[in-house]
Amino acid sequence: MASQKLEDLLNLALSATKEEREQSDQLNVGYNEQGNTWELIVKFHGDITMLESVGIVVEVLIPGYAVLTVPERQIEFLSQVEEIEYIEKPKRLYFQLQEGKEASCILPVGRAPYLTGQGVIVGIADSGIDLSHEAFRNPDGTTRVLALWDQTLMPDEAAGLRSPWGFQTGVEFTADQINEALTSGMTGNMTALPTRDISGHGTSVAAIAAGNQGVAPQSDLLIVRLGIPAEEGFPRTTELMRAVTYMIRKAVALGRPIAINLSFGNTYGSHDGTSLLERFLDNAAEIGRTVICVGSGNEGAAMGHASGRALTETRVELSVGNYERTFGLQIWKNYADVFRILLTSPGGESRLIDTGRTADNGQTRRERMEDTELLLYLGEPAPYSAQQEVYIDFLPVERYVNPGVWTITFVPVSVVTGSYSMYLPSASSIGSETHFFAPTPEVTLTIPSTSSKVITVGAYDTVYDAYADFSGRGYLFGQSSVDRIGSIFSKPDLAAPGVGIVTAAAGGGYVSVTGTSFATPFVTGSAALMMEWGIARDNDPYLYGEKVKAYLSRGARHLPGLTEYPNPLVGWGALCLERSLPL
């Protein structure tokens, strides 16, 4: 029996073979083959430094949360340690790739009361930044960046490349080091420092929030380039948690308020705020004078979510495109409901999953259907969630998963709510032909925008003054298909311009971008302006956290054609900073 202290996906990964993990897009995330170790997220109480005596590397983040590097043979021991409450593996993060100051009522507050973000820090955790770009330099050519932590670099003490205090990975560059590099005269996303923004995503995001032509042009910047020092270099949830911890520690040490921007996410999870990452952000948002803004993601029109109520036999059809190498399918249900789930392949083969057989809980099954191997895992409810997960990893026997129509049939046995919710991986990681035939666009927020105490930002099109259909949709508690609820809690919280935004490009110049990635920094910069008015100018020393969210929600502008607020498309409405300030 698998340990109930371990999340379902970690239990499945540990029971999978080396070959199965290497084929899967999810199962090997967090595993280091060279050292046969796992990077794991834990929630804990008390003192866990004693774990270092058995070869486990302990990296405490905020109180109660840590990232551990654990030899695989020690995971069973770790699960038996009383101080360890729950354990999750990292997940991949996907940047949300896909003019707004006037539309967001920001221009008036730049004139009177002349808010610029001075005295407030804007933190950007993303793909890095082009330090040489004019958008981030003072009139004398010096940098506006207080510090930059590049998580993808390897420390080298002899070369003066050091990790930030309290961390063991990546390299931190101070403002003095950045200024010294800038005086070398190198340009075009190139300085004497070995850090780059290869995709340009982070540069564009930072320029909207706090560039010289951005929302908060006189705020100081803290930058974290997310990633790992490995060939694939993709960021993981553990890197995100480290980044947030780093930025909050810096702000607290400086005695400054901070607005943090997170423009990425993934689809793995029950989307009810109960994962360790979501709970971590809820706790982090209460440290210091902090606001955390997260994009709702670009999954609204991706056809990767299907949900409903199976009170009678219900069929859901899934299209799998050609040349799909691997993908995972999550099925979430209330543990009180008992279904038989019949999975049918394009060629007509069927396999039965009986969610009422408690003997199967925590067990991995392997099934072959045509030329596809399935890893099936029937989970248990977690200490923080009553939802039960059925996870199915589709792996090719040779090169590709069988294309065509796969059918998932829910046969109710003993149901109370009958609710189910299914998710495919982020659209950026699978082919466009892989999708549900009858998708549910609601509750397509990416995680961690589902955290309750962050400001979740959707996107709208300023040309048409209308919701952008790619923007991840949320729910009103009490009205969602999975019966999450509380009458005043809604997601997203509000929307901001996210279509055709002109912003700085890595390497110099400017570029037009679209996506919730670029809507989010409008809100992050606006939060910085509000905290300048409240905290830096001593008008309201408590204007941070949930209070900023409340003021932004109250001031949000209603969009044409939408009559009920809050709603799952744009929450309380479109960002309007002028109406949100308590002047």
Image (cartoon, rainbow, N blue to C red):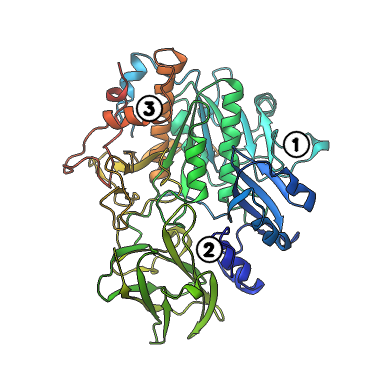
Q: Amino acid at mark 2?
A: Asp
Which residue is pictured at 37% across the width and 39% down the height?
A: 501
Q: How far across and how far down the image is residue 11, in percent?
A: 58, 65
Q: Is residue 22 above or below residue 287?
A: below
Q: In the image, is residue 408 above or below residue 581?
A: below
Q: Looking at the picture, which amino acid does disc 3 mark? A: Lys
Relative to 437, does residue 465 appear above or below in the rendering? above
Secondary structure at numbered mark 1: loop
Q: Marks 1/2: CA distance? A: 38 Å
| Residue at numbered disc 3 | 547
Q: Is residue 377 visible?
A: yes
Quadrant of the snapshot with the C terminus: top left
* First along the sequence among labels 1 and 2: 2
Label 1 is placed on what type of residue? Leu
Mark 3, secondary structure of its residue: helix
Give the alpha-carbon distance from disc 1 to disc 3, as whole Å: 39 Å
Q: Position of residue 402 (x, y in %)?
A: 45, 80
- For disc 1, the marked residue is 161
- Disc 2 crowd rating (10 Å Cα; few below 14, some 14-19, many 20+) is many
411 or 186, which lies in front? 411
